Image (spheres, helix red, strand yellow):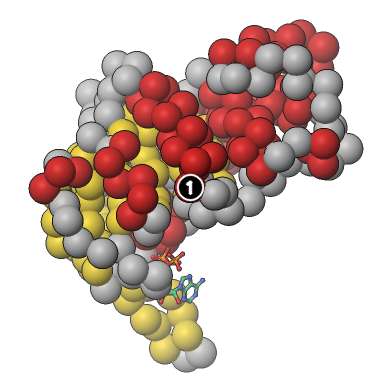
Amino acid sequence: MHAVSFRNIAKDFPIGDDRIRVLHGCSADIEMGQMTMLVGPSGCGKTTLISILSGILTASEGEVAVLGQSLTKLKDHQKVVLRRERIGFIFQQYNLLPALTAAENAAMPLVAAGMKLPEAAEKARAILDGIGMQGQGDKLPRQLSGGQQQRVAIARALVHNPGLIVCDEPTAALDAATGRAVMGILRDIANDPGRAVLVVTHDNRIYNFADRILEMSDGRLIGDFAPDAFHRE
Ligand SMILES: Nc1ncnc2c1ncn2[C@@H]1O[C@H](COP(=O)(O)OP(=O)(O)OP(=O)(O)O)[C@@H](O)[C@H]1O
């Protein structure tokens, strides 16, 4: 099974009375057990494409299957369930709730699935311990550094054991060394054959962490490389 399989994806956005096409005929398969990076200049359509692949936006044309499930046939509420149960999200700006502790923040996907907070927080704490956050579970986000907050976001993306982890510019707010540490954790996560990690970035300092790089330009996928074969930017 592919983690994500998409064919001939197009996306139009309304602009006044008109429509503008921002994705054109995008097709690829994202493999389990790999870190795939989607790279390209600002505005080329990376966020739009991963939003479609993770069921946040609907494609204007084309087919998407996530973890063997076709999105085309799913109703909106079924896409919400798919996202909640089978996908983990990591963003540039951590998006932690300021009044909750690190463990409680990381526990949120389990709480959303109906688990009681104390039990969910214990599971979250075990994940935090495994990614260098021992003893930090009771701290509030404002007591943590940017790199530590991103680790909490990683724990939150992992806690419900999803098959697909989607990361949008995960290192953009971090200095180079902290960004590499965070990418090292994501790299380990991607080695699990039951998972795929999809990273959108234009941070060329982290391209070497990928197994595979998909290059986008002007709404099209224009290249499919191993990282050592990708020397642009
Ligand atoms: N809701 C929307 N309505 C109209 N146009 C949009 C909308 N969302 C995105 N776009 C346009 O689609 C194009 C692709 O945007 P997108 O955010 O996917 O690019 P990106 O590669 O992720 O850029 P960045 O790296 O800056 O985040 C851009 O021209 C953007 O202005």
Q: Give left or right: position of 14 versus 32.
A: right
The residue at 36%/40% (across/down) is 198
Question: In which image quadrant can residue 143 be found?
Answer: top right
The residue at 19%/43% (across/down) is 227
Q: Residue furthest left?
A: 229
In the rendered view of the protein, which quadrant contains the N terminus?
Answer: top left
Secondary structure beneath label 1? helix
Residue 201 place in picture, x, y as percent: 39, 53
Residue 11 place in picture, x, y as percent: 35, 67
Q: Residues within 10 Å of mark 1 (few under 14, many from 20)?
A: some
The residue at 29%/16% (across/down) is 193
Answer above or below: position of 26 versus 90. Answer: below
Which quarter of the rendered image does ligand 1 occupy? bottom left
Q: Give left or right: position of 58 versus 225.
A: right
Out of 11 and 157, give the one closest to the viewer. 157
Question: In which image quadrant can residue 8 be found?
Answer: bottom left
Q: Residue furthest right?
A: 99
Location of mark 1 (residue): 176
Residue 220 place in picture, x, y as percent: 22, 65
The residue at 58%/53% (across/down) is 173
Residue 100 place in picture, x, y as percent: 84, 32
In the rendered view of the protein, which quadrant contains the C terminus?
Answer: bottom left
Q: Residue furthest bottom?
A: 17
